[in-house]
């Protein structure tokens, strides 16, 4: 009787262990239609981002939701889009996309951004954003041969340059917005080449809130450069509550560079005696490269 009890206990333990192993196997190998190959795309890292330093001295990548609020993936085969998946930051498994695909060769495009809607990926060479508004944007592009179940770990690269205006004088009362109108960059992106692909006239507005009045301020806008280095013409207008421009400053030949902040610092709301772009220094800011100018 004692031997029977021990045998039953051992059998129950083995059955329990087999059940646990089967559950894990099923999770990794989901059911799918015959002839399909299971591919999991995983955003594992963003290029040129600050790392969080932990007590152990090791570095870990910042959480993906701190970088972007949307991920858009598109798969192309022989020039035809065959799959499109869109994720929001609050979706389960944000940054991991599982697909069942027919064996074959594909082009995969992934865009990570914080726009107000889904990026339109017409082709790997033409990607547009809602209202042509550009946010901090990262991308992944690859040609993929799918022959068996696989996982694709993706390193996303930054696609934009940033213009930053820092005012040394205080924001006056009675103004509503700053309008940034700029040419020379692009609001359409080519993920194959990694640069902007169309000449764009970009317009961005930045609101002036009550807590900003009476203090210096900082404003930022983005663009896709047409090459590693590019130049913008930046017109910044101060708008009152009626939307009328009360003052304006033009920055000619603003140098912008992929993954670089070009920062102009000076007395913006009042006349300044300094010369625009008289001096500049190069330094690192949150793993961006930054160009500083005084005006």
Image (cartoon, rainbow, N blue to C red):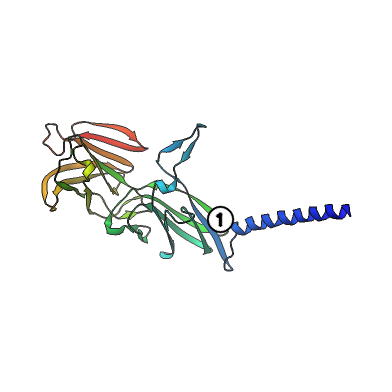
Q: Residue at x 83, y 52 (%)?
A: 6
Task: Report the side of 231 relative to 77 (left or right).
Answer: left
Task: Report the side of 287 relative to 99 (left or right).
Answer: left
Task: Label 1, secondary structure: give it.
Answer: strand
* Rendered image quadrant of residue 33: bottom right
Q: Nearer the viewer, residue 140 or 43?
A: 43
Q: Position of residue 206 (x, y in %)?
A: 23, 48
Task: Farthest residue to the bottom: give it.
Answer: 34
Task: Report the side of 57 relative to 279 (left or right).
Answer: right
Q: Residue at x 23, y 42 (%)?
A: 211
Q: Quadrant of the C terminus?
A: top left
Q: Quadrant of the N terminus?
A: bottom right
* Rendered image quadrant of residue 168: top left
**What residue is shown with label 1?**
150
Q: Residue at x 30, y 36 (%)?
A: 290
Task: Farthest residue to the right: give it.
Answer: 1
Q: Nearer the viewer, residue 190 or 139?
A: 139
Q: Position of residue 18 (x, y in %)?
A: 71, 56
Q: Position of residue 283 (x, y in %)?
A: 32, 32
Above or below, 61 against 68 in this view is above
**Mark 1 neighbour density, 10 Å: few (under 14) some (14–19) many (20 or more):** few
């Amino acid at each position: 009787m004692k031997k029977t009890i021990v045998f039953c206990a051992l059998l129950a333990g083995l059955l329990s262990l087999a059940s646990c192993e089967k559950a894990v196997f099923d999770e990794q190998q989901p059911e799918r239609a015959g002839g399909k190959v299971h591919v999991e795309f995983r955003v594992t890292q963003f290029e040129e981002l600050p790392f969080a330093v932990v007590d152990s001295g090791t570095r870990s990548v910042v959480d993906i939701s701190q970088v972007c609020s949307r991920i858009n993936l598109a798969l192309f085969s022989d020039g035809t889009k065959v799959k499109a998946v869109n994720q929001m930051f609050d979706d389960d498994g944000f940054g991991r996309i599982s697909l069942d695909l027919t064996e074959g060769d594909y082009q995969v495009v992934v865009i990570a951004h914080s726009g107000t809607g889904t990026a339109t990926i017409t082709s790997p060479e033409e990607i547009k954003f809602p209202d042509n508004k550009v946010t901090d944007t990262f991308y992944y592009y690859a040609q993929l041969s799918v022959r068996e179940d696989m996982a694709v770990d993706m390193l996303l690269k930054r696609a934009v340059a940033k213009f930053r205006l820092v005012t040394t004088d205080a924001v006056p009362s009675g103004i509503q917005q700053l309008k940034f109108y700029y040419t020379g960059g692009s609001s359409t992106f080519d993920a194959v080449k990694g640069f902007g692909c169309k000449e764009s006239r970009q317009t961005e507005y930045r609101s002036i809130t009550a807590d900003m009045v009476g203090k210096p301020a900082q404003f930022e806008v983005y663009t896709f450069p047409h090459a590693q280095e590019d130049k913008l013409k930046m017109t910044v207008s101060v708008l009152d509550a009626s939307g009328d421009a009360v003052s304006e400053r033009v920055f000619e030949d603003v140098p912008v560079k992929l993954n670089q902040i070009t920062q102009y610092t000076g007395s913006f709301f009042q006349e300044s005696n300094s010369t625009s772009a008289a001096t500049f220094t190069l330094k690192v800011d949150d793993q961006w490269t930054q160009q500083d100018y005084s005006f």
